[in-house]
Amino acid sequence: MTQRALIVGLGIGGMSAAIALKRQGWTPVVIERAPERRKGGYFIGLRDEGKNAAATLGVLDSMEKRTPKHIQFWDVRKDGTRRRIADLTQETNAPIAVLRGDIEDALWHGVEGKVEVRFGTTPVAIVNGATQAQVTLRGEGGQDTTETFDLVIGADGVRSTVRKLVFGPDKVFFHSIGTMLCAFPLARPVEGFKAGDGLMIADVKRTLTVFPLEGRPSTALFSYRTKHPERASKKDPLSVLRHIFADLDAGGIISKALEDLSATDDFLFDSVQMVKMPRWSKGRVLLLGDSAWCLTLYSGMGASAGMIGGQALGEALTAHPHDMDAALKKFEARMRPFVRKHQRFIALRSQLFVPSNRISLWGRRVLWQILLRSRNYLFRKNS
Ligand SMILES: Cc1cc2nc3c(=O)[nH]c(=O)nc-3n(C[C@H](O)[C@H](O)[C@H](O)COP(=O)(O)OP(=O)(O)OC[C@H]3O[C@@H](n4cnc5c(N)ncnc54)[C@H](O)[C@@H]3O)c2cc1C
């Protein structure tokens, strides 16, 4: 008889796991709290690690790629003046630009019609046995049913319900970076900038970054530092951002972006939390993706880690088809070094997004300039 896995969450981690398990002859069932599949989302830079994982999962070719053909990035000052800086194509291991929804759309092609997906469903209780787990599921009408699975995979994001039910409360595993983010698609081009132009408006403890995308409006990322991120995440994003960015409007860019925020439901406003756990599995329950190790946006590796995690789980279950403990240990051994490497520098990398003081703001500007000049120098030398 084939083994059944319950996957909680139809995000990048959950769908990657579903594709990999299906390939290994398992019967995955995915449950998703939302009533339907989400679309759109924010800018993601996908580096080689993520591209390779997407290729192994068979979804890279069908993924929409949105790196602008003529990309330029600008550092825009308070008074509206601007200076060219390096863009993402000038980084080492240069990422391709996609939306989170592009990765999910591509993964969905590997899931749709092949794996059972139940929307509007969430776990409310898990009894974690020695060889199976019993899960009480609450469906759309509010009715509860109990089912048994050989493995439960919590791929339900940074505020994971599976983690709370089986491993403990958020506060045990959260490591706050002390920053807030608000990400959303802009409704219109930024006035005075060309298609393909990205920009940063940076000041101490607050920034707006606009990421350009080919063939569709850019996405905006507001970030700011606060001593009480969890408290802040319960507030209304629009009024908080209006207040914090009031004197940094840089020629109206901020206020226009906030007008676009007021007109969309497709936004994410949350505190930035790293998740650190000593083990990602207990009995027959495993965490994968942001629920297990949230690398935050500052690592630039969260989406990649979700896909690598799904693939690593499939490989571990193939290597140990009749020994779950050994398979979960193999998964842990494969993922732990990758996660450790990318978690190590998150606080430092956060300075590139939201400088915490004047020195950091200055250092960041110098760094972008050096990157731009070294690229221009190499370009001239080779042409
Ligand atoms: C602004 C921003 C920029 C980023 N930029 C990058 C980047 O450049 N490069 C990169 O690699 N990564 C980036 N990331 C990180 C990346 O987006 C995440 O790491 C990745 O999307 C996490 O996927 P996931 O499937 O683990 O979790 P999620 O995307 O959170 O998906 C979890 C899913 O589970 C569902 N769910 C939640 N609770 C329940 C429940 N109780 N029952 C059922 N379903 C549930 C949710 O509805 C959701 O569909 C960025 C993140 C942000 C916020």
Image (cartoon, grey):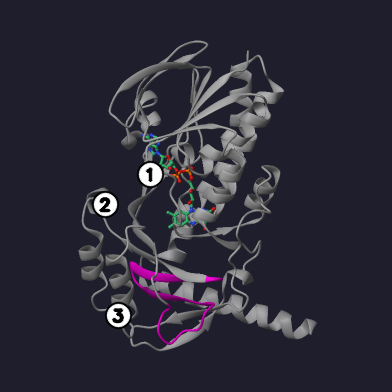
Q: Is residue 153 above or below residue 230?
A: above
Could you give the CA–CA distance between mark 3 and mark 2, rounded to whole angstroms? 23 Å
Work out whether residue 354 or residue 71 is closer to the camera in this orientation and state it. Answer: 71
The image quadrant where one finds the C terminus is: bottom right
Mark 1: give few (<14), some (14-19) or many (20+) Cα within 10 Å.
some
Q: In x, y percent, where is residue 238?
A: 24, 64
Residue at screen point 55% across, 20% down: 4
Label 1 sits on residue? 175
Residue farthest to the top, as pictured? 130
The image quadrant where one finds the N terminus is: top right
Q: Which residues are magenta?
A: 189-215
The answer to whether the residue bearing label 3 lies less than 8 angstroms from the nearest atom of ligand 1 is no
Locate residue 202 relative to residue 153 in the image: left or right: left
Q: Amino acid at mark 1?
A: His
Q: In x, y percent, where is residue 356?
A: 36, 65
Label 3 sits on residue? 249
Residue at screen point 40% across, 84% down: 191
Dot 1 falls on a residue whose secondary structure is: strand
Residue 336 visible in this rendered orientation of the protein: no
Sequence-wise, which precedes: disc 3 or disc 2? 2
Sequence-wise, which precedes: disc 1 or disc 3? 1
Sequence-wise, which precedes: disc 1 or disc 2? 1
Label 2 sits on residue? 233
Q: Based on the displayed image, in which of its 4 quarters is residue 305 positioned?
A: top right
Locate residue 214 relative to residue 8 in the image: left or right: right
Q: Amino acid at mark 2?
A: Ser
Q: Based on the displayed image, in which of its 4 quarters is residue 245 positioned?
A: bottom left
Work out whether residue 168 or residue 318 is closer to the camera in this orientation and state it. Answer: 318
